[in-house]
Image: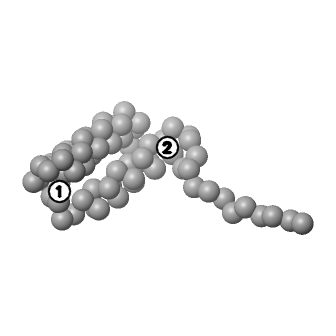
C-alpha cells in the first residue's frame, strides 16, 4: 500500500510533535495513524516512537525519490 507524500509529511509532523511532548515531560501522547485509529506512547516506549519517526522519514525519502542516507562501503586501494 503506497502512501502519498502529503500523508507521510502529516504523520511525520504529528509523530515528531508527540516525541517532543514526551521529551519535555508529558506523561502520554497520542499519534493519529490515518484511518487505522491512533496509538498512544508514554515515556517507557519512546524508543518505539523514535523508530516510528525513522520509518516515516525513510518512507518519505523513498516517496520523494531521495537517497535513504545510508552510507556505502568505502574501498581504499594502494
Label 2, residues with CA under 10 Å away: few <14, some 14-19, many ≥20: some
Judging depth in this view, the residue of 42 and 68 nearest the camera is 42
Residue 58: x %, y % from top left: 46, 50
Which residue is denoted by mark 2 in the rendering? 61
Query: Quick one: which residue is furthest to the left in this view?
Result: 27
Can you say whether 60 is above or below 71 in the image? above
Query: Quick one: which residue is furthest to the front in this view?
Result: 24
Q: Which residue is drawn at 40% across and 38% down?
A: 4
Numbered badge on residue 41? 1
Q: Residue at x 34, y 50 (%)?
A: 53
Q: Which residue is drawn at 73% across and 61% down?
A: 74
Residue 24 appears in view: yes
Q: Which residue is drawn at 30% across and 38% down?
A: 13
Can you say whether 51 is above or below 63 in the image? below
Residue 38: x %, y % from top left: 16, 50
Residue 56: x %, y % from top left: 38, 48
In three-dimensional space, the C-alpha distance between marks 2 and 1, rounded to whole angstroms, equals 25 Å
Q: Is mark 1 on a helix, strand or loop?
A: strand
Disc nearest the viewer among 2 and 1: 1
Q: Is mark 2 on a helix, strand or loop?
A: helix
Earlier sequence position, callout 2 versus callout 1: 1
Residue 31 appears in view: no
Judging depth in this view, the residue of 64 and 15 nearest the camera is 15
Position of 49 compared to 37: left or right? right
Judging depth in this view, the residue of 76 and 29 nearest the camera is 76
Can you say whether 63 is above or below 52 in the image? above
Residue 20: x %, y % from top left: 24, 45
In the rendered image, the quadrant that contains the C terminus is bottom right
Q: For residue 66, which quarter of the picture?
A: top right
Numbered badge on residue 76? none
Position of 45 compared to 50: left or right? left
Amino acid at each position: 500500500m503506497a502512501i502519498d507524500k502529503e500523508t507521510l509529511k502529516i504523520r511525520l509532523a504529528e509523530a515528531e510533535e508527540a516525541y517532543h511532548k514526551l521529551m519535555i515531560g508529558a506523561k502520554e501522547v497520542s499519534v493519529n495513524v490515518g484511518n487505522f485509529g491512533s496509538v498512544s506512547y508514554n515515556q517507557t516506549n519512546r524508543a518505539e516512537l523514535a523508530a516510528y519517526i525513522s520509518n516515516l522519514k525513510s518512507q518519505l525519502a523513498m516517496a520523494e525519490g531521495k537517497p535513504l542516507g545510508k552510507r556505502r562501503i568505502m574501498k581504499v586501494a594502494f
